Image (cartoon, helix red, strand yellow):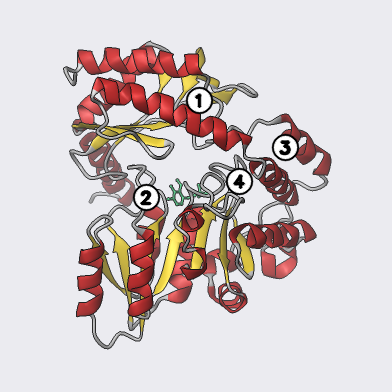
Amino acid sequence: MVSIQRSYYHFVKKELDYLRSCDLYRRLNIDNCVQGSARIRHNRQDNILNFCSNDYLGISTQKQVVQTTKKSLRQISPCSSRLITGNTPELERLEDMLAVHRKTQTALVFPTGYMANIGTITALSGKNCVIFSDALNHSSIIDGCRLSDAEIRIFKHNDVHDLEQKIERVRGAARKMVITEGVFSMDGDFANLKIICDICQSHDALLIVDDAHGDFIFRGIKDRSFSGVPSYFGVNSKVDFHISSLSKALGCFGGYVATSRRMRELLINRSRQFIYTSSIPSHLCVSAMTAMKIAQRGYLQNKLFKNIEFFGRELCKMGLVGDQPRTHIIPILIGSEKNAVRFSRLLLRKGILIQPIRFPTVKKGCSRIRISVSALHTQSNILNAVDAIRYAAARLKLI
Ligand SMILES: Cc1ncc(COP(=O)(O)O)c(C=O)c1O
């Protein structure tokens, strides 16, 4: 008789062999940051230029944030969930700041952006609810949809006609919900937010925007605060739920939802990912509040946009991207998983770290190199990356 352990041994071996055979196997690296620089120690290699961090403004190692956080450290963790004894004054202050930042009545912090997505989607859905989700939405949105009891309709990426047709075809649903990202995490393009808002309004659908990658970077034309993609498109007040992460442009840790007072009340009472987990420690709230003040000054975004412009121009010249990129996420489409891994390895030989992005993060055969531009990069860092990309692309006969 085959023991359970033995059957699991075969299952695990088969899974891992399969992943290796199709170039989808992942391994962990060890990375160490260098304060105030885009250089890191990657495994045993010093001085590697990091072009794949989500620390878009370079705030995570800023002295002011690190020192203020250290000073505030009295307890490692509240060791309790929010509804027991984990709701601290720092959390409440951070939520007040986030609500002002996002121009909503309230905000609610979750331990991560991943949990904010799942916790919001599941609390609002259920039977007799239909969720319309963009085909390229992040895994945390996909997982939220999977965990909900709702019917899921995937609309073609950023295709507002497909969305509208799909919404029109649904009759008799008690509730409809549309979910999109603000800046798409793997493609770096903007959601067609203005039209999506109109569709939601005319079909009585609730709109959730996950702006993890646009928050603290994009600002409205009139609005001087960096409240993200909905402000940039002038539709901030038409979004019912703004979801975001504190661990991208803000360089900190945690996730949040900004919404109305009523909706917050529901999440506190119904969101399992909010209720059944420990709250984030106070010192991390202090980090986020300090980082927000730095992000609001705007000089880091100015630097970031100059870098995007410069890097984008060089990539366009090489013919590796079609149009001048509009955001800090610049994918270079490679296609096969094998070549994406090879591309990344060739870059590393030249001291440039850009990880390959493969299935299931993107579709099979759509593997890519995802460049994240940061305000920390200098022009000479970018020129080094451009040289390395030219070398790798030539070796793989992409140019
Ligand atoms: C679009 C999007 N939403 C949510 C998340 C999750 O955020 P966090 O890292 O805070 O869990 C990510 C993280 O990669 C993301 O890209």
Q: CA distance from mark 2 to mark 1?
A: 32 Å
Q: Identify the residue at image location x=24%, y=33%.
A: 322
Q: Residue 67: name its quadrant.
A: top right
- Numbered disc 4: secondary structure: loop
Q: Identify the residue at image location x=42%, y=24%.
A: 310
Which mark, by number, is residue 253? 4
Which mark, by number, is residue 190? 2
What is the x, y in percent for residue 197?
A: 39, 68
Q: Residue 351: name its quadrant.
A: top left
Determine whether, in the image, residue 160 is placed left or right of residue 61: left
What is the x, y in percent for residue 385?
A: 40, 18
- Marks 3, 1: nearer the viewer: 3
- Numbered disc 3: secondary structure: helix
Q: Identify the residue at image location x=25%, y=75%.
A: 167
Q: What's the amino acid at mark 3? A: Val
Of label 3 and label 2, which has the lower sequence position? 3
What is the x, y in percent for residue 138?
A: 37, 52
- Numbered disc 2: secondary structure: loop
Which mark, by number, is residue 30? 1
Of residues 364 and 155, the one drawn nearer to the viewer in this rendering: 155
Q: CA distance from mark 3 to mark 2?
A: 30 Å
Look at the image and tell me whether residue 25 can be seen. Answer: no
Of label 4 and label 1, which has the lower sequence position? 1
Of label 4 and label 3, which has the lower sequence position? 3
Q: CA distance from mark 4 to mark 1?
A: 19 Å
